Amino acid sequence: MMLLCGSSHGADEVASLDAEPAELKIANRSIMVFHATLLGEIPAARAKRAETVINERLDEGATVTVSVDAVQDSYLVLLGDRRAFIVSPKDLVSTDLDVRQGAEQAAQRLRQVVEEARQAQSLRFLLIAAGLSIAATLVYLMLVRLCVWLHRKALSWLPQQMRKHTSALRIGHTQLIDSSNLYPLLRRLLALLRWVLILLLTYEWLSFVLQRFPYTRPWGESLNLYLLGLLRHVLTGMVDAVPGLLIALLIFFIARGISAFSKRLLERLARPGSISWLTHETLQPTVRLTALAIWLFAVAMAYPYLPGADTDAFKGLSVLIGLMISLGATSVVGQAAAGLILTYTRTLRPGEYVRIGEHEGTVTELGMFTTSIRTGLGEVLTLPNSMITGSVTRNYSRVVQGQGYVVDTTVTIGYDTPWRQVQAMLLEAARRTDGVLATPAPQVFQTALSDFYPEYRLVAQAVPSEPRPRAELLTMLHANIQDVFNEYGVQIMSPHYLGDPETEKLVPREQWYNAPAAEPREPGPS
């Protein structure tokens, strides 16, 4: 014993931490983790030597006792009269235990291994363990069948109860909840609950059976410890998250109040005479933008108090979502900015008749991302707002007197037709067209004097209350123009010459006021 003590003392003096740790495991149970190198033996060699000694003593079948003996700063763990292993202070550098506590815990685990080895050699113990496992299996199967039976009963009982209770939830004659839509959801929830119960029963049955036999007992204990640790972690996380959730809810409640106050304030400021840019058209988008800014600020303030906000997974998910938004929302942001430009510049308003590029129709909806117009051909076009801001927009309703929109058309007539006659015929065609207002009166403009003909443009205002589309109104106007020109013997044709005409294309003075043009009256003596 003195030699053993001296060797231990010398070994303790040369212990070092320059090797990989090694775990001593006997019959699936961890006994000790060695970190130090003693007497030239690295941790792996120490674990191998201790495993050999312990297995030899256990194979002898004799009853042995486990004890702990102090030697200087280290402790010997003895199995009977033989040294199993030495616990050095440097073996416990990764724990908060002192060397005595570490040795006692290792000895206690070794005693448990010795007891389990004795049980594994007892036929009576193994038969009892097998019987208990069979009984647990029978109980497990009965409980599983009970879960299946309860699931079937719930499925047969659920439709009747749903019809009974959902029929009572009405507002007037309207049923709030449709049982046909709710039943599939509840059926899936019941199936999920059934599988959760079956999996939990399976987990507990497996843990119980594994703990009945000495060799598999550590596995069963680890299953229970894992489940209990998981439940403890979840419950602790829920309790710890309550203060943060309360602060986050308080922030959201304050944001809701500020949002409601800002909405009422903007509604007051939108009254005529308050702020020029805040009108009835810009009120709703301004309210939405203000509410969005308030809620984004509230989310930023509440973010640190949300459960799991400080975890790497939550941070990584936030970065991923931000990256996806930054990469995929470029066009969306551009469309939204274009929608705001159209709204606040008041380029378009619902009900106005406009021409955007090659598209023409009545504005039916001015949204954040797109604008819808209804054409005269029965079509509804959805145009991206960025396309509208990047093209020329002609508004036929903005410059009219009162409500309505502008109707215009262009004809080209040769120089041999009196311009007064052409103007009178165009005005006559406008008067015959239903839907064209008499006040303000239609006008004819000579927009160009080309090489072969002048260009005449008829501009009139349409009746806004007429449901007739602009294309149909233009069709009627063009038809009346052709009829009037035919009545007065004027052909609608634009001449193009390949050579000089035989006679000059002039209008004699006596033909300047051909019908339906009226010669102006001479002013009488005052």
Image (cartoon, grey):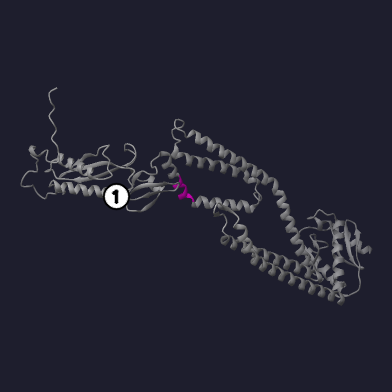
- Viewer-nearest residue: 40 or 193: 193
Residue found at the very far top of the displayed protein: 526
The structure residue drawn at horizontal position 73% and vertical position 72%, both measured from the top left corner, is 141
332 is within the stretch colored magenta: yes
**Amino acid identity at mark 1:** Ala
Quarter holding the C terminus is top left
Residue 324 seen in the figure: yes
Residue 20 seen in the figure: no
**Residue 196: x %, y % from top left:** 68, 64
Which image quadrant for residue 504? top left
Callout 1 crowding tier (Cα within 10 Å): few <14, some 14–19, many ≥20: some
**Residue 57: x %, y % from top left:** 88, 72
**Residue 140: x %, y % from top left:** 75, 70
Left or right relative to 143: residue 317: left
> Which stretch appears magenta?
329-336
**Residue 358: x %, y % from top left:** 32, 50
Residue denoted by label 1: 471
- What predominant SS class does the magenta segment belong to? helix
